[in-house]
Image (cartoon, coloured by chain):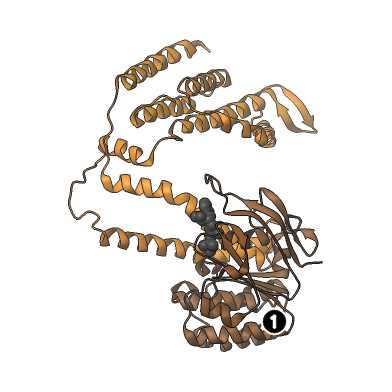
Chain colours: A brown, B orange
Amino acid sequence: MAFISIKQVSYTYNGRKKPAVKDVSLDIERGEKVAITGLNGSGKSTLAKLMLGLLKPQKGTVLLDGKPVQKYSLPEVGEKIGYLLQNPSQMLFNTTVYNEVAFGLKWRGKSRAEIHRICKGYLEHFDLWQLRDAFPFNLSEGQKQLVALTAILALQPACLVLDEPTKSIDVSRKKKLIEILEDIWRQGTGIIVISHDVGFITRFGGRRVHLVEGEVVDAAAGC
Amino acid sequence: MLQLDVRTKLLLVVIFSVLALVYQNPKVLALLLVVNILTLSILGLPLAIFRGFYKFIGLYVLLIVIQSFFVKSGEPLLKLGEMYLLTTDGIWYGLAIILRFLILAASGLFLMHCNPTELTLALVKLRLPYEIVLMVQIGIRFIPVFINELQNTFNAIQLRGVDLRRVYKRKVLRVYVSIFSPLLYSVWQKAEKLSILLELRGFRKVPVRTYYRDIALSRTDYVIMATALLMTAIFVYAVKGL
Ligand SMILES: Nc1ncnc2c1ncn2[C@@H]1O[C@H](COP(=O)(O)OP(=O)(O)O)[C@@H](O)[C@H]1O
Ligand SMILES: [Mg+2]
């Protein structure tokens, strides 16, 4: 059984005539690598929110691990899927970078020493350790993006949904991001990235799902 | 739908809201609500939103119980030992609150379908300073966006393991307290950015702002305003005895 199973899902935002996502069916296996591509406004972020149950489809169903995603509470979904919002600022709500990354770990009852070890590991990977006491809201866009990403990675979920993870990060960090994604994918984590960064997608590999005006089209149609 | 000037609609909103706040007698308020709904339908404004109000029935009952609990006067209808659960006065006051709420919601409907630019113009013509008018306009436009962003943040918090729905846990309060200041800061940051953007685009560079579009009061507007004022006078006089 597929890990995420989307069946004939359509979603139209309030006050809009055209659906943002239209009749999408998609099965994503456990541990699979998927790249969702498409132009601005093609419905990629909406599809991600539907996968996580943050939006309720007007038509169709989304199954997560065989159960309708609406049946889970958000913390339960969060345990299965790590979600990076397209706008990383909306994911920051702590007073220091360290606390931002430690937040989810604390709530999952990890010990202080273990939290320290995990946070340090991930923050050092992205050269962010020296920023650990900084206020997340005052970071640059790229740094915010990385902190939000680190906070998700640190929770080590079974699957990641990353909405435009390379949006404002530099070349060297992009390389590190690819490395770490490759690494955790080998260890069995499913990864779904949403991106229109052709270079990144090419190196990331994985199955391509291309959206045009809310509909899935033949992946060969390009990026 | 009747094409009315925004100022006419504003007058109607003011009349109904003020009357709703002035009167406390549920009989008067019920009459006012009926008049309000009639006015809305005469002007051809949609009433569909009222269909949703039955969802709040639980809240209404709760209001009545709370009122009974604190308002000790009136005949007790339901008692638990020395505690009054339901009194006639409780029902009476609870009803007044509910009706007031409904009237305020219904009078807001007058403005629901008006164009934001026209609303701005109307406020400018009422001689409000343009700066304040713009702030009102930005406020109205940005509140939904801001709520959406906050919703995203709350989702992000919950996805990281906090169940905000289970408020009985003491810890949840701590979460709210700890995230409050960063969120406040982000709002402030946004406001600052907005003000810089406004100035960069020449806001307040020249003292008088002119508009391409204009609004004018038509004969219908004058008739409706006059009728509204007359009706208000009649209403006030008629309910004096109640
Ligand atoms: N909160 C919203 N309210 C109304 N329309 C929205 C909202 N969010 C997105 N949309 C619209 O839905 C469509 C798909 O948006 P989105 O999924 O964000 O696209 P993408 O992530 O592929 O750029 C766009 O036309 C966008 O304007
Ligand atoms: Mg997007």
Quadrant of the image occupied by residue B227: top left
Q: Position of residue A178 (x, y in %)?
A: 59, 84
Image quarter (top left, top right, bottom left or bottom right) of the N terminus of chain A: bottom right
Q: Amino acid at mark 1?
A: Trp
Element carrying mark 1: helix
Chain letter of disc 1 in the image: A
From the viewer's perspective, is A121 left or right of A18? right
Q: Left or right? Give the position of B210 relative to A39.
A: left
Indicate the quadrant containing the C terminus of chain A: top left, top right, bottom left or bottom right.
bottom right
Residue B135's place in the image compared with A78, above or below, is above
Residue under label 1, please give it.
A185
Rendered location of residue B25, percent (x, y): 55, 21
Please tell me whether residue B83 is drawn above or below residue B199 in the rendered image: above
- Would you say residue A220 is visible in this rendering? yes
Local crowd at mark 1 within 10 Å, few (<14), some, or many (≥20)?
some
Along the viewing direction, whichever of A137 and B206 lies nearer the viewer: B206
Give the residue at x 51% y 67%. A87
Is residue B159 left or right of A169 when viewed as pictured?
Answer: right
At which x and y percent is residue B10?
Answer: 38, 30
Q: Nearer the viewer, residue B188 or A221?
A: A221
* Vertical relation: A171 (above or below) B22: below
The picture places residue B4, in percent across and down from the top left corner, at: 37, 27
User: Residue at coordinates 45% horizontally, 14% vertically from top-left?
Assistant: B235
Q: Residue at x 66, y 29 (%)?
A: B72
Does residue A52 show up? no
